[in-house]
Image: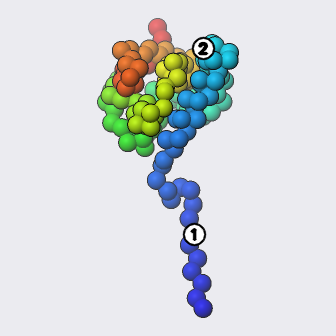
Amino acid sequence: MKKLVIRKKASDNLYFHPDFHIAMNTGIKYLEKNYGNEAVRDYLRQFSRSYYKPLIEKIKKNGLKPLKKYIEQTYEKEGEKIESHLDESTLKIKIEKCPAISYMKKRKIAIAKSFIETTKTVYETIVENTSYSFEMHDYDKKTGKTTLIFRRKQ
């Protein structure tokens, strides 16, 4: 009898992790309820400094280009389109809707009050010890629509 062997790697699979967003949202709600909003920000700062350390080092060495690439790839994997523009000193990203919020809303999951911090605090932390600053404009908590601006510090 013939034996059929199928070899698969995780990298062979389509990127898909939407339930991560639900887990993050649940954790944020727990921190909000039991420890307050500053605990949410503290957790996200600690997470970001560790998880994004390689990206932070690339930004320090190569400027905003690696950040632009990272954000574009992330949204592409999540199936959302964004507009991005990079010049010598500024990276501007326009996001029409947050894939995490869309996913949770479809499943009727209440969004944590401080879910915005998963973008705001994370990007502030990523650029905190670089030569760039971060601003978030016109955030819509219902959709996650926003504009992210990274600028070279004066």
Residue at the bottom extreme, as displayed: 1
Where 55 sits versus 122, above or below?
below
Residue 33 vertical position relative to residue 97 in the rendered view, above or below: above
Residue count near mark 2 (Cα–Cα under 10 Å), binned few <14, some 14–19, many ≥20? some
> Which residue is rendered at x = 45% and y = 26% of the image?
64
Based on the displayed image, in which of its 4 quarters is residue 27 positioned? top right
Task: Using the numbered discs, state the Cα–Cα distance from disc 2 to disc 1 in whole angstroms.
Answer: 46 Å
The answer to whether residue 66 is seen in the rendering is no
**Residue placed furthest toward the top:** 154
Which of the pair 73/67 is nearer the observer?
73
Amino acid beneath label 1: Arg
Quarter where residue 52 is shown: top right
Q: Which mark is residue 37?
A: 2
Question: Residue 75, position in %: x, y?
Answer: 41, 37
Q: Which residue is mark 1?
A: 7
Residue sitting nearer the eye, 107 or 132: 107
Q: Residue at x 48, y 11 (%)?
A: 153
Nearer the observer: mark 2 or 1; the answer is: 2
Residue found 51% across the figure and 44% down from its top: 17
Question: At x 56% / y 72%, what residue is drawn?
Answer: 6
What is the secondary structure assignment of the residue under circle 2? Answer: helix
- Residue furthest out toward the front: 108
Q: The residue under label 2 is which amino acid type?
A: Asn
Where residue 78 sits: x, y (%)? 42, 41
* Towards the viewer: 151 or 110: 110
Sooner in the amino-acid sequence: mark 2 or mark 1: 1
How many numbered discs, if any? 2
Dots 2, 1 in contact, CB < 8 A: no
Tell me: residue 12, above or below residue 76: below
Q: Nearer the viewer, residue 132 or 30?
A: 30
> Can residue 137 be seen from the camera position used here?
yes
Question: What label sits on residue 119 in the rendered view?
Answer: none
